[in-house]
Image (cartoon, grey):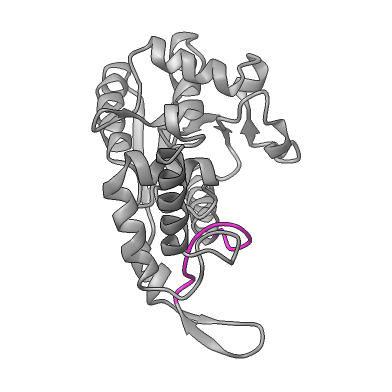
Amino acid sequence: MKYIASVSFGKDSLAMLLKLIKEKEPLDEIIFYDTGMEFKVIYKIRDKILELLKSKNIKYTELKSKQPFEYTMFEKPVKHRNGTCSKGYSWCGGRCRWGTTEKNKAISAYLKNNYGNDYIEYIGIASDETERIRYDNIHKSYPLVKWNMTEKDCLNYCYKHGFNWDEDGILLYEILDRVSCWCCANKNLKELRNYHKHLPTYWNKLKEFQQRTNRPFKNNKYTIFDLEERFKQELKGSENK
């Protein structure tokens, strides 16, 4: 039996990995699926963890999509149920989480091709988000639930061990609920407002992407430019108080 941890280098999966190693749980390999759209700090954390894995003789595997993220988003021929065709899936998020689908398929294929049915995959789902768990899959294990570690516990555990997701002086988990792909359309208004205020580089990239698609970013109603105007008006309103 092989034990493999799926790690995104966000707070939950990283806390899981660090504690698995600390508790000397069986761990043969970790898998990171690189979308190509991760925050810069995710890659910095990955590189730091690679040193730890090497010292523990734990295998590291990095998976990628067959096609670049932007090709799938803007150029890939897509056939619709009504018989029409278009280019690209546009924003990833909401009911069209094509990036997540690609990630899950890639990891599942890798595990099946390399280990058949002789593996356990550790999944970093915290104890206060168990609605995401699929208990029907005998190959998946949820250590954070066993340890009763909430999302807050995971973040504090990572902070304690020297990981803080510092992106150009901004602690991402202080302004974002999730440090997932920076272009994820599931970002809420609070997060997007903080993008606009604290992360101008990524906000400008979102604007560049919006110029390449007609699909609104938020709730199938608001484009990035609509949101920018909203945030500017909010800022003017607060300054006039």
Residue 95 part of the magenta-drawn span: yes
Task: Tally the marks.
Answer: 0
Residue at image position (43%, 29%) is 173
Residue closest to the far bottom: 83
Residue at image position (24%, 23%) is 51
Residue at image position (44%, 52%) is 233
Residue closest to the far front: 241
Q: Is residue 76 above or below residue 46?
A: below
- Range of residues picked out in magenta: 88-97
Can residue 67 be seen here? The reply is no
> Which one is in front, 31 or 221?
221
Tell whether 61 sits left or right of 24: left
Residue 19 horizontal/vertical position (percent): 48, 14
Residue at image position (69%, 36%) is 133
Tell whether 200 sits left or right of 150: left
Can residue 8 be seen here? The reply is yes
Residue 132 part of the magenta-drawn span: no
Quadrant hosting residue 163: top left
Residue 170 horizontal/vertical position (percent): 31, 30
Q: Secondary structure of the magenta portion, mostly?
A: loop
Tell whether 156 sits left or right of 70: right
**Position of the N terminus by quadrant:** top right
Residue 197 horizontal/vertical position (percent): 36, 41
Residue 189 horizontal/vertical position (percent): 53, 46
> Which one is in front, 124 or 56?
124
Residue closest to the far right: 136
